[in-house]
Amino acid sequence: MTPASAPPRVRDRLRTAPDGPVRVLHAGVHALYVEVGGWCVGVVGPGAAQVPCALRVTDMRDIGGTVPPSTAYLGYGKLHVGSGTLSIGRLVGAYVPPLGDGATRKTGPVTVQATPPATVAGLVVELVPRGGIDAAAAARLVGRGEGLTPLGDDVLAGWLAMHRAAGAPTPAVDEVAGQARDRTTLLSATLLDCARHGEVLPEFADWVRTVGTDREPAAVRALHAVGATSGAGLHVGGVLALNQLREAA
């Protein structure tokens, strides 16, 4: 099987988790998610969101043919799925880049205000006060919505990741995100953990690099194209974070 690439923390989780069968959480044409040591680890092909908790492969057919595999096994730091073994051949960076100079100043350029889907806007109006996200709002967001990554978690993840880009600590909200596993899906709880450690989707990282530049609109459109509402939720969370950071500057 072609070697996979993965962020460093995914490699470390595979190395430290106990050997043996692992539970398959979701198996599809473009992505597979399994539980490893209490966390979610994905295997994603080019057609899936390149989440920061996954191994990346060039062709998902290598791991299961036309039918996604229903069983997986971890042994000696390698994930065995379908008819092959996934070994990590290359490490990829998944960390959010630092915000550019002036991005969080009140006098800095205002980020692009793309119109989010009504479901995203409605959830933010309902759950987030005018002052932005705090620990209480974060607790209301966790687990709100449907799917593998509920929308409320996407918004919170975007907020956390933008604070990591700004180098701004958020201990109270971090604590809420760190206790999310009992209130949301395992994949979403894992992605919240990634966000509070500054690990993000490539599209989110691209947006952060372009904040306040003429390249930002295209980066925002690419982020909104991720999933049905996931990318838009991440963007709205990041915008909320930028607004709070600018108010505090």
Image (cartoon, grey):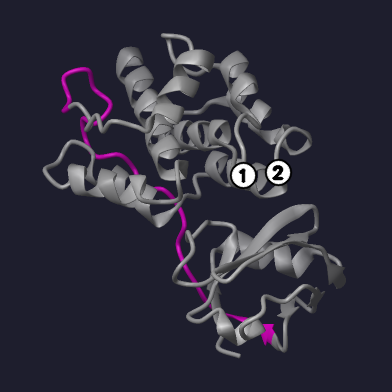
Q: Which residue is mark 2?
A: 185
Q: Position of residue 180 (x, y in %)?
A: 71, 34
- Residue 89 on the magenta segment: yes
Q: Which residue is rendered at x = 60% and y = 33% of the image?
A: 145
Q: Position of residue 12 (x, y in %)?
A: 68, 64
The quarter in which the C terminus is drawn is top left
In this orientation, which residue lies closer to the viewer: 100 or 215? 215
Task: Look at the image and give the residue range highlighted in magenta.
Answer: 85-109
- Residue 96 on the magenta segment: yes
Q: Which residue is rendered at x = 45% and y = 36% of the image?
A: 158
Q: Secondary structure at mark 2?
A: loop
In contact (CB < 8 Å): disc 1 and disc 2: yes
Q: Position of residue 154 (x, y in %)?
A: 52, 37
Left or right, 221 with respect to 148, comes to: left
Q: Secondary structure at mark 1?
A: loop
Q: Which residue is rendered at x = 42% and y = 9% of the image?
A: 131
Left or right, 162 with respect to 106, comes to: right
Left or right, 162 with respect to 199, comes to: left
Mark 1 closeness class: few <14, some 14–19, many ≥20 residues within 10 Å: few
Res. 208 visible in picture: yes
Q: Which residue is mark 1?
A: 147
Residue type, label 1: Gly
Dividing the picture into quadrants, the one containing residue 93 is bottom left
Most common SS among magenta residues? loop
Q: CA distance from mark 1 to mark 2?
A: 8 Å
**Image height of 18 relative to 144, above or below:** below
Left or right, 111 with respect to 89, comes to: left
